[in-house]
Amino acid sequence: MRHLTAALAVAGVAALLAAPAAGATPRRQDPSPAAEQPATVPSVRVKPGTSKGTGELTPIAGADRLLAPLGVDAACPAKIEIGLRSDAKKPVYADLFVEIDQPLSASRSMLSSYLPPGYELGAKLLVAVPPTTPEGEYGLRLRAGQRTLAVPVEVVTLDRLDNGGNLALLRPVTASSQHTNANYPPCSVADGDTSSNGWAGGNGWNDATGRTWPDTVSVALGGAKQVSRVDLYTLNTERYPAATFGLRDWDVQTGLNGQWQTVAQVRGNVAGSVRSDFAPVTADAVRIVALASNGANDYTRIIEVEVR
């Protein structure tokens, strides 16, 4: 069985190396929930690294620390890229072990693969923070071979979080509907990730009412704020370009004490992101009213909404 596993792993690596080169024309596919797999990118990735031939396994992380705010929707936990690099001189079975301080919990405790020399193994790690967790610093440890990489996890309230000027960041989100065929949580439109690469894997909202309009997604700002700009990111990758699958028409609305007003309109969009500027208004919420998408299946697909 171990030899069979190794053969399958090597075949997987070979398939990755045989992937189309950058700039190659991909085969068009439909990103609608009924047509796609649970995610358009693999949850675990193997790629060539920068081997020095030291003979060691090295744990790696996408950041030197992780912020994990309290009060965030459980469907959108804190996330960080983790992995390991094999600097061995021959193929090895490589294991990465994940340890985290309680009461925090991680989405995986182990990451494993058969790695050729110089290759890297990577995956996304989700960190859940129970609502009763005390503020403070907690430990996340990634262990591979004889090496351990410590990544501090800072648990803070939303009011103490540095949002970089984005008033929508990690704030509560409500949507008119949510497709359930894959992972399209509404809260992901305010998680700070503007990339479409995680589409159908937890980064991006897809409504459940194809060819039925309008669709709405609203972000509560946590109190009255001065607002004069909204940036919207719609689905846009080489495989799923915005001009074919992204949001085309929408209104930007601001709300105060439950009263909504339209402050900007976008029509005929074919870009992956659009910035809407308007005269400053006082608002405690912002709402996107989706009116039409590009393409025949007519779903609303929003990756991120930023409010400034």
Image (tube, rainbow, N blue to C red):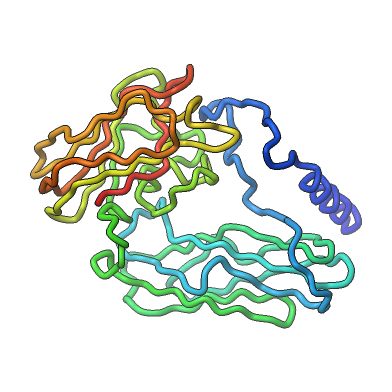
Residue 70 picture quarter: bottom left
Is residue 227 left or right of 71 when viewed as pictured?
left
The residue positioned 87% from the left and 65% from the top of the image is: 91
Rendered view: 13 above or below 210: below
Residue shown at 40% from the left, 29% from the top: 247
Q: Is residue 100 left or right of residue 190?
A: right
Percent coordinates x, y for residue 58 in the rendering: 70, 74
Q: Quadrant of residue 286?
A: top left
Vertical placement of residue 70 versus 76, above or below: below
Question: What percent of the width, then of the height, locates residue 106?
Answer: 52, 65
On the image, the x and y values in percent for residue 278 come to 19, 40
Position of residue 53 relative to residue 15, above or below, is: below
* Lateral position of residue 130 relative to residue 95, left or right: left
- Tell me if 303 is positioned left or right of 290 in this view: right
Residue placed furthest toward the bottom: 146
Q: Is residue 303 above or below residue 63?
A: above
Which quadrant holds the N terminus? bottom right
- Residue at (44, 63) in percent of width and height: 128
Residue for point 61% across, 74% down: 142
Instruction: Report which quarter residue 290 is drawn in.
Output: top left
Residue 103 percent coordinates (x, y): 43, 72
